[in-house]
Image (cartoon, helix red, strand yellow):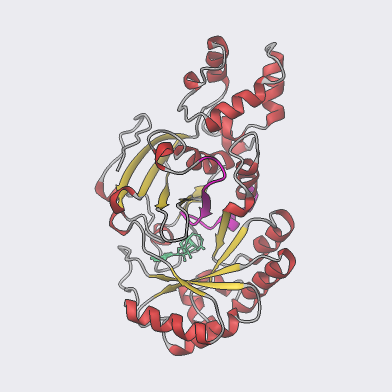
Amino acid sequence: MTDGSLAGGLPAISETDHSVLAAWLEARGEPAYRARQVLAGAHRSGADGFDGLTDLPAGLRDLLATAFRFSTIDASHVIGADGGLTAKAVHELHDGQRIESVLMRYPAHGRSAARTTICISSQAGCAVNCPFCATGQAGFGRQLTPGEIVDQVLHWHRPPWRSLDDGLPGHYNVVFMGMGEPLNNADRVFEAVRLLNDPHRLGIGARHITVSTSGVVPGMDRMIEELPQVNLAISLHAATDVLRDELVPINRKWPIDEVVGAGRRFAARTGRRVSLEYVMIDGMNDDDAQADGLATLARGWRSHVNLIPLNPTPGSAWSGTPRLGVERFAARLRSGGVGVTIRDTRGREIEAACGQLHAQLAGRSLRPGAPAVATPA
Ligand code: SAH
Ligand code: SF4
């Protein structure tokens, strides 16, 4: 448990240690196996309250509800897009902060199997202030607790979403690419990853989890030591410090050399490939010189470049590089010996795409105190 978990009143079950829960149960005369039963029920049954844990005695369910919160999320409002393949949830927390998570389903095609990705937030808002990102423009709210991070994933385990994903635990990916800079909240994010990994909870393999960072070097070095199996993505977005100082202001603290150096250390020490994210902004960072600079930075170690066409955000006049320009940039990188993927732009119409998350619900409002709403697309 963390101090933050108590701010909303009762401790949340999603961030209560097994040993704490076991001691609480034991003090009430319950057998030792109950702690695992409660954790499994809370994480795997799809129930949305202690009432739904029907393999527990009714008296115990009532007792649990007096001592623990079932979820740190008070209410969720869901909007669907892309013919039901994408859904965004705006989650309201106990203090009125709003955060967002996104479900993306990719149907099987060709030889690639169907997969599902859940994109979650690590902070309410973000202090890094990248000018092309709606989260950055909205400013920083507060850190999320481990339970608030886990509960976003749990949201998508409940009907009707559970039946929509191919989503038995372990069969989907979790990416820290929602609101916030995860490595500016590293202790709680790392604890959330351990909770997500826990086989008695969701049991999501570390290799199915990705942390995306704007370049917090000490946090990347901690990942090498503490989470070497988790995937690392670095939001590079520029190949020169002059440009990156503007696009990713944290570059003034940790410039490109240090950021790429940390990525190289991660790849060397873990043997794993690091993603370099590069948002393509028309006339800003999409010329041949940037492509060649990026190729130099990415070459010769286990890295892979993901090109993300810029998604529109309300506060920014910039637009995305046209498709042809993105393809030309990709071709130039490839001929420079770099692996490249052009990412799709899922969820634009509901402001669920990369960088569009700002918890405004596109004009819709959440009813205060409303129960969790799960609206199928
Ligand atoms: N704060 C972390 C993780 C969340 S942002 C980070 O910056 O890495 C997830 C990704 O979306 C980052 O690569 C970010 O740079 C990118 N992004 C932000 N705004 C965007 C926009 N308007 N269009 C496309 N991608 C954007
Ligand atoms: Fe924060 Fe990432 Fe947005 Fe930059 S791109 S403001 S680091 S969430």
Q: Kindly give the residue lying farthest to the left in the view shown.
A: 363
For image coordinates 49% across by 78% down, the residue present is 238
For image coordinates 56% across by 11% down, the residue present is 57
Percent of width and height locating residue 203: 61, 40
- Note whether residue 157 is visible: yes
Task: Return the residue nearer the eye: 35 or 271.
Answer: 271
Give the quadrant of residue 374.
top left
- Note whether residue 11 is visible: no
Apparent side of residue 375 relative to residue 233 in the rendered image (left or right):
left
Give the quadrant of residue 218.
bottom right
Tell me: residue 329, above or below residue 111: below
For image coordinates 54% across by 76% down, the residue present is 339
- Disc tally is 0
Q: Is residue 16 magenta?
A: no
Give the quadrant of residue 338.
bottom right
Percent of width and height locating residue 372: 38, 32
